[in-house]
Amino acid sequence: MPRSVPVLHTPPPNTGSTQYIQPVPCRLLRNIRRQNNWPRHTTADGTHKRTRIRMNTVTVSTSVKQSLMMSRRANRMQRLGQMLGQAFLFSITSLSAIAVLFIFVFITRDAIPFFMPDAGSFNWSNIRQFFTETAWYPSARPGQFGALSLFYGSAMVTLGAVLVAVPLGISAAVCLSDVLPFSLRQIVKPVIEILAAIPSVAYGFFALVVFAPLLQNSGGSVLAFGFWLVALPVMGIACMLAGETVGARFSETRRRAAALTATACLGGASLALLWLIGRELSGMSISSGANAFNVSIILGIMALPTVVSVSEDALQAVGRELREGSYALGATRAETIIKTVMPAAISGILAAVILGVMRAIGETMVVWMASGNAAQIPSPFYNFMEPVRTLTATIAGDMGEADHVTGSSRYHVLFALALALLAFSFIMNLVSEAIVRRSRKKLGK
Amino acid sequence: MNLHTRKLLDRSFTAAGFFAIVMMACALILILYPIISRGLGAYIFRATCEHRRVQFEEFQAGSRQEIEREAAEIAAVRQPVFDMIAAHEKDLKAELQEAFDQVRALAAAEGGFLQRSLERRLKRAHADASLEECLAVLSDIRESLKGQYDHERFIGVIGVITERKQRVEQAAGKLSDMKHALRDLLGPLPGDRRPELLRSHYGQTRWDRSLHYLDKFLYRYDWDYTNAENTGVKTRTPRADEFRGTDLEPAFGYVRDNIEAMMQPRLTFYWRFLTTDSRDAHFFGGIWPEVLGTFYLTIGAMLFAIPMGVIAAIYLCEYARPTKTVSLLRSCMSTLAGVPSIVFGLFGLAFFLNTVGVSDSKSVLAGSLTLALMILPTVIRASEEAILAVPFTYKEAALGLGAGRWRTVLTVILPAALPGILTGIVISMGRAAGETAPIIFTAAVSVGLAISPLQALDSPTPALPWNIYNLCTEHEAVDEIRHVQFGMVFTLVALVLALNIIAIALRARISRKLRG
């Protein structure tokens, strides 16, 4: 059993029935007194004074009585005013809903002519070309609009970003919610906030001006370093675990020595393997620094804050009781989190991943600047070292040339791309909302 | 699994968490470090005398006496180089002399029409004529001699002309190459015609760029393609070798040793980078129009987004009952938050510009509206959280004193929630300032002057985010103005981070106050 009981950092649950009574600042209440039409009475020396209402006085002056009686007409006016006010508030609030509606309507309206050049009939060959071909030559005559490679590029960099952001983000969230003490957490939180605040064009600039030349000039070393950084600790832990398992087969006296020997042997072998792979990687040369790999890393870093903060919220929402129960049964912290907390928070974590995906797929500047903008499916298809082109970058890049020819198919095809993006983000949003709703129901909140 | 293994797993699990957090912090440092260190280089750098001259002539900054005194000093140091060039040119011209003598003799011997035409041409190659002119006259003469019907007679002269010309032309080519490199470093040489582009009116304004061009002056870089199977290999040869044995040979050593005296670098805090506009596509000057454009766009977006956002938050928190309509509204808002920023840009183009027509072309107004829509969900959510964080007791007390619902909101809840709302607003301001995609089609232009607030209604503006993109991808001389790009990125990031630090400080104050 673990010797030290882990410290719980989750705040005490707020059950609602035992709310802490907050003192009300007098300053705020004074506002009310000053503006409310409290009945006044005139004192002997002619100055006005506010009447004091005492609960236990039976004799209330007549003027007060009169003013407290509201005429029916004033009442009606007041209610009308309230209703109008509420209607006004509601209409302002619904503006954002109308905006969403308008976005859908206007993007669709300009996308439709691409699919239906003659009103009412679909142009099936156009649609087939759009979804299944990779030739993207909008300025050719007639234009070729095979957007498959663009869809593929978007999917590829998003996948790369998820591969970077999700493992890092979830481990960071776990660390933030269950491991770090409060004071350290206060230091780490601003780091996340600053990462989220840096403008996307600054990320793109970094990717293009700093990271891409680095990859192009010494890409092999960068890859080898990254590989060692990740693989070395993983291998080390795996070797130690394997050593322990081997040691467990021996008798009590020889267990320790056997485990150590096994760990050392395995460690040596895996080090040799790592060294070989690292040498192979460092010999690689990357022909262009502006490629899917570069963009994936940067997009992953950009999506990190979203993933971390949303999944941390989900982990916090699980509450103290489940953790306490698990610890009481003798589980270590890792076991508690993996076997108890994570399954309870899985829907929140999924929502975090979805939000991260949306952030990555909707990002424009980084991919436009640093992905190389080559409308192609890399060969082989999993080659992250080749330039790609994404939906967002195509919209941003081609619209500059197409907006002079408003109404042409190269203008409308960009709206079709936007519609695809919009539909994807809408569906993702619905899914994440459904997941969050389900999790709330499950947690009983 | 035994206890030992479980402990090991537990520790490695913790280590993975720490690893992730350290990686995140490292990523932040790695990204911010070059931006800050090189971005500060746009403001604080070793400025050469050329920089001070640009500032004086283009921006009327600095004192005339100072500039003139410095110009005299520099001219004194630079003069020997120009003298060496002149001497070398003279040598080359002297080498041509034999050819001219032969032509002159031929003209005297021939007489008649040929003499007149040759002498007319020879007159153009007088003593003060430049080397290029003399060469041009020689080839002219050769062509005219070749054009004669009995040109076999002149074969001797033509041969001499051709041989001399070839020899001198080779040397002249090297010389003009070297002069070109020198021009890049020091600005126009004496006797040059006034160049058309402003960027060639001055030498290098920064010491780091000066050293770069000094290297290009001292060495000649070529690509060696002799190995056809490989890509080209860069070769570097000292220029002094090309002029070995001529008057020009000592010039290279002289320039190398006296470059500090020639450029007079001085550490300068160039605050005008922020407050002046640019000249000749950001070769000189600052980024004021971009900063101002970003400012307009951000303020414009906030003007639309704050009232709408705060009112919507008030409605959602204080008035709305959990009906179907309200939950639909909420899911619309989260959809709006998830719409990709580039789609907002397209919507702004299709709706605000092409359908409503808020202005004839791109304008700050259209950009602000688009940005406002984009940050609306953020403002609403932040304000809602701030309002919900106001303790319920405040509201109860206000209602208990007889205030109506509206008055409670206005006098108690909003003031109490104000710091929280401000935090949200400041954060979304940062987001609006840094966003690029929505303004590409609605507000931003690559080149432009600072505009007045009134012009903002119907004219586009340069803006920091867009111009960062533009300068580092579409500018004609990307490498020449790296410092401007870094300076712009640094300014934008500093702006956004300052806003965020304000927000963090605000929030720290609130949490301190709430904790008592």
Image (cartoon, coloured by chain):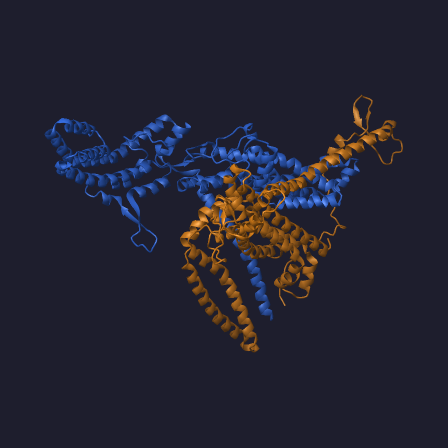
Chain colours: A orange, B blue
- Looking at this view, is B375 or A388 the one in front? A388
Q: Quadrant of the N terminus of chain A?
A: bottom right
- Looking at this view, is A112 or A18 the one in front? A112
User: Seen in the image, is A135 located left or right of residue A81?
Assistant: left
User: Seen in the image, is B84 located left or right of residue A180?
Assistant: left
Q: Vertically, is B28 above or below A225?
A: above
Q: Position of residue A144 (x, y in %)?
A: 51, 47
Residue shown at 22% from the left, 36% from the top = B84
- Looking at this view, is A137 or B48 the one in front? A137
* The furthest residue to the left: B109
Q: Vertically, is B303 above or below A200?
A: above
* The furthest residue to the top: A46
Q: Is residue B46 visible?
A: yes
Q: Position of residue B114 (x, y in %)?
A: 15, 29
Residue shown at 21% from the left, 28% from the top = B124
Q: Vertically, is B79 above or below A373?
A: above
- Looking at this view, is A353 or A107 the one in front? A107
Q: Position of residue A70 (x, y in %)?
A: 85, 30
Q: Position of residue A415 (x, y in %)?
A: 57, 43
Residue shown at 45% from the left, 67% from the top = A273
Q: Quadrant of residue A104 in the image?
A: top right
